[in-house]
Image (cartoon, rainbow, N blue to C red):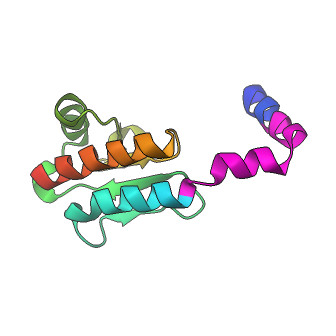
Amino acid sequence: AVASQRVALGALEAGRDWVNHRVASLDEQKALVLDALAPLGAGSVQGGSGAIYLVVRLPDGAADDVAVVRWLCDVHRVALIPGSACGYPGHVRVCYANLPLEKTKEAAARLKKGFEEL
């Protein structure tokens, strides 16, 4: 909690321009990730309003979220969080605000290919 408070204080001291620069690409990053998740079908994505991550329901044949995360990491070089680690077995958590926009584009393309294969 102390570290988060110090970061928040630093952002306040740096001013709104610093914050605006840091969040400017979030909408585009979210759109890229939503497109990458499209192969999972309508209704598979949950959340995302006001957050920097999405919770995604895996298809019935791929309900072992830990195995899916390992496979995506090993084969497609994308890292997700198993839903079971967050209380959502059979889901994955996809964070989209941790990379520069160009890296997000690359990761989203690999993620989409992985979900197309899944």
Give the residue at x 52% y 39%: 98
Count of marks placed on residues: 0
Asked whether residue 87 is in view, the answer is: no
x then y, percent, for residue 80: 35, 39
Give the residue at x 20% y 62%: 39
Q: 43 or 20: which is nearer to us?
A: 20
Q: Judge left or right: residue 18 versus residue 116.
A: right
x then y, percent, for residue 15: 86, 45
Asked whether residue 55 is in view, the answer is: yes
x then y, percent, for residue 64: 19, 42
> Which image quarter: residue 35?
bottom left
Magenta stretch, overall SS: helix
Above or below: residue 106 compared with residue 60: above
Give the residue at x 14% y 49%: 62
Give the residue at x 26% y 37%: 69
Q: Judge left or right: residue 51 versus residue 118.
A: right
Q: Is residue 17 magenta?
A: yes
> Which stretch appears magenta?
8-26
Above or below: residue 41 compared with residue 99: below
> Which image quarter: residue 74?
top left
User: What residue occupies the far bottom of the structure in this picture?
Assistant: 42
User: What residue occupies the far front of the structure in this picture?
Assistant: 102
x then y, percent, for residue 16: 83, 51
